[in-house]
């Protein structure tokens, strides 16, 4: 009775009362925000509601109006400089959350329930699906928030959310309400952007210092380090301090998986020093993926981390993301007559999270037309048979991206078989076809709305011109920014490199080699 009728009635009463009581204080806060810095009073953020529908959660704006969009706070250069004077106070007191009383009044949220996930927190959304926590309205505060808050790993947070969803009672809500007040005043369980080295040390019970000559890289490393450590502790690993010096030639922010490589490195070190090598290469990769999804808010899959952790040339089947099938493919790239190169387009990944998130979202929208969660479960023949209806429901871009998905899955299998058969020309044909499909169907070359700046398109077109029908090239990684991968005939390497750097800049062409070992102890 309470869950079905009483809870919503109580939400309406409490939110109406709060609206009346807090009208003047909230008005004063709004005035303070306007006087403190130019920009809107409210900040809107896309969240997941009941039944996995999306809505815009309301908060008081705490950062300057010119703050880069869709960049996590901890990845901003000098993040503190973006936080306004009013914002610092509002964050400290959690008063920036007050406008959510209007989300509650509108029926999008409840006072007590699991906090609404970000639209791109796919691992949390999936974990909540398993415990039916997505079946209820999200809340202002919940059971997870009074049992660790931001410090909780995804699986633990989802477990608390599921426990609440299974036992929605008036007295549970009362207890959580008053415990939440205590947590707010004590600032317990809060992990904000711009996490300091000292905070990492406190949470990990380690003495550590991280230095880098690149501010953004430093912030990324600190965030990755913290989450990898938290994951090991969650598994019962007792950590101690250690000294490490890291040197990397991987281009940051270029789609070359520099963050994945660092996550795997730290995971490998901890596994070796403190955990008796209990974790497999794939498990270390999964820890790295979790760091990407949670701390960076990137809808990253598991491929980059697995490739870094396993090493060599691998074929990965993600039919079961928890236990992916990883198969090493034996092929001697050193004597195939071609040199793999990476061309830096000069375009950065900042502000592109929405572009990356849209791809799996649109593919899932096509899958849902057939009652499936992922496109892999959809029969290709059935997809084409209902193409007209799917197009009407999802839009043309989603359909084109689905076409790429079906073709690409087939191409990967063909390319693996070509390498096993020693047919490198067949492999290159697959690379070329994949590159064309990425541009035409997946549409991950040019960010939406870009006209004057199309670095990736120019870089790929330049590669194709320089190769003159030989070799192969395609966008590398997620696309939209970063790099182009090219397989260049050995005898053309010098000419290709000079031609590319004449347009893209000195040092933009990087010659690669494939390391046969991934995360491992050397010596």
Image (spheres, grey):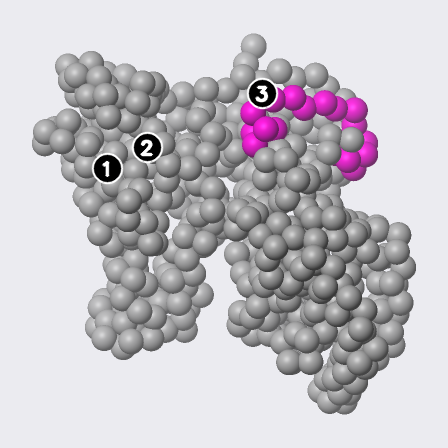
Looking at the rendered structure, the secondary structure element under dot 1 is helix
Quarter of the figure with the N terminus: bottom right
Q: Name the residue under label 1.
A: 458
Quarter of the figure with the C terminus: top right
Task: Please report whichever mark, 1 or 2, sits nearer to the chain's N-terminal start.
Answer: 2
Task: Please report whichever mark, 2 or 3, sits nearer to the chain's N-terminal start.
Answer: 3
Q: Which of 67 and 296 is in front in this view?
A: 67
Question: Residue 300: x percent and y percent?
Answer: 48, 46
Looking at the rendered structure, the secondary structure element under dot 3 is loop
- Side (left or right) of 2 relative to 134: right
Please say if 166 is above or below 468: below
Q: Mark 2 points at which residue?
A: 345
Tell me where the magenta segment starts and ends, as one range.
Answer: 199-218
Residue 499 within the magenta-colored segment of the rendering: no
| Residue occupying image coordinates x 22% and y 17% | 498
Please say if 158 is above or below 17: above
Q: Name the residue under label 3.
A: 213
Question: Residue 149: x percent and y percent?
Answer: 76, 54
Res 436 → quadrant: top left
Q: Residues within 10 Å of mark 3 (few under 14, many from 20)?
A: few
């Amino acid at each position: 009775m309470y869950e079905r009728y009483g809870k919503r009635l109580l939400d309406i009463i409490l939110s109406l009362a709060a609206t009346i009581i807090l009208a003047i204080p909230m008005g004063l806060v709004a005035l303070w925000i306007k006087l403190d810095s130019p920009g809107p009073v409210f900040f809107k953020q896309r969240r997941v509601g009941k039944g996995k529908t999306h809505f815009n959660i309301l908060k008081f704006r705490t950062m300057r109006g010119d703050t880069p969009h869709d960049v996590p706070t901890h990845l901003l250069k000098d993040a503190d400089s973006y936080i306004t004077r009013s914002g610092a106070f509002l964050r400290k007191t959690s008063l920036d959350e007050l406008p959510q009383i209007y989300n509650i009044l509108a029926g999008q949220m409840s006072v007590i329930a699991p906090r609404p996930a970000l639209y791109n927190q796919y691992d949390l959304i999936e974990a909540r699906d398993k415990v039916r926590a997505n079946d209820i309205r999200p809340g202002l505060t919940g059971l997870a928030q009074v049992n660790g808050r931001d410090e909780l790993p995804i699986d633990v947070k989802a477990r608390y959310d599921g426990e609440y969803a299974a036992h929605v009672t008036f007295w549970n809500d009362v207890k959580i309400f008053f415990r939440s007040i205590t947590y707010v005043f004590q600032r317990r369980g809060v992990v904000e952007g711009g996490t300091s080295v000292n905070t990492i040390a406190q949470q990990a019970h380690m003495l550590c210092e991280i230095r880098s000559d690149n501010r953004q890289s430093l912030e990324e490393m600190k965030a990755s380090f913290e989450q990898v450590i938290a994951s090991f502790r969650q598994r019962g690993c007792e950590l101690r301090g250690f000294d490490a010096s890291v040197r990397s030639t991987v281009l940051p922010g270029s789609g070359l998986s520099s963050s994945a490589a660092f996550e795997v490195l730290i995971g490998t070190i901890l596994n070796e020093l403190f955990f008796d090598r209990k974790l497999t290469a794939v498990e270390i990769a999964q820890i790295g993926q979790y760091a990407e999804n949670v701390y960076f808010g990137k809808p990253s899959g598991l491929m980059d981390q697995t490739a870094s952790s396993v090493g060599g040339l691998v074929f990965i089947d993600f039919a079961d993301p928890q236990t992916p099938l990883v198969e090493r493919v034996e092929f001697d790239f050193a004597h195939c007559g071609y040199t793999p190169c990476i061309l830096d387009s000069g375009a950065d990944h900042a502000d592109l999270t929405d572009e990356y998130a849209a791809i799996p979202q649109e593919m899932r929208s096509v899958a849902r037309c057939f009652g499936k969660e992922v496109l892999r479960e959809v029969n290709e023949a059935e997809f084409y048979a209902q193409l007209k209806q799917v197009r009407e429901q999802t839009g043309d871009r989603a359909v084109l991206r689905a076409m790429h998905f079906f073709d690409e899955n087939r191409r990967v299998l063909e390319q693996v078989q070509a390498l096993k058969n020693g047919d490198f020309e067949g492999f290159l044909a697959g690379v070329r076809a994949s590159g064309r499909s990425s541009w035409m169907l997946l549409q991950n070359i040019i960010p939406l709305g870009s006209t004057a700046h199309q670095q990736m398109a120019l870089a790929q077109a330049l590669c194709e011109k320089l190769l003159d029908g030989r070799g192969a090239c395609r966008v590398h990684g997620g696309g939209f920014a970063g790099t182009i991968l090219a397989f260049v005939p050995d005898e053309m390497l010098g000419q290709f490199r000079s031609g590319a750097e004449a347009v893209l800049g000195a040092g933009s062409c990087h010659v690669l080699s494939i390391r046969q070992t991934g995360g491992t102890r050397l010596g």
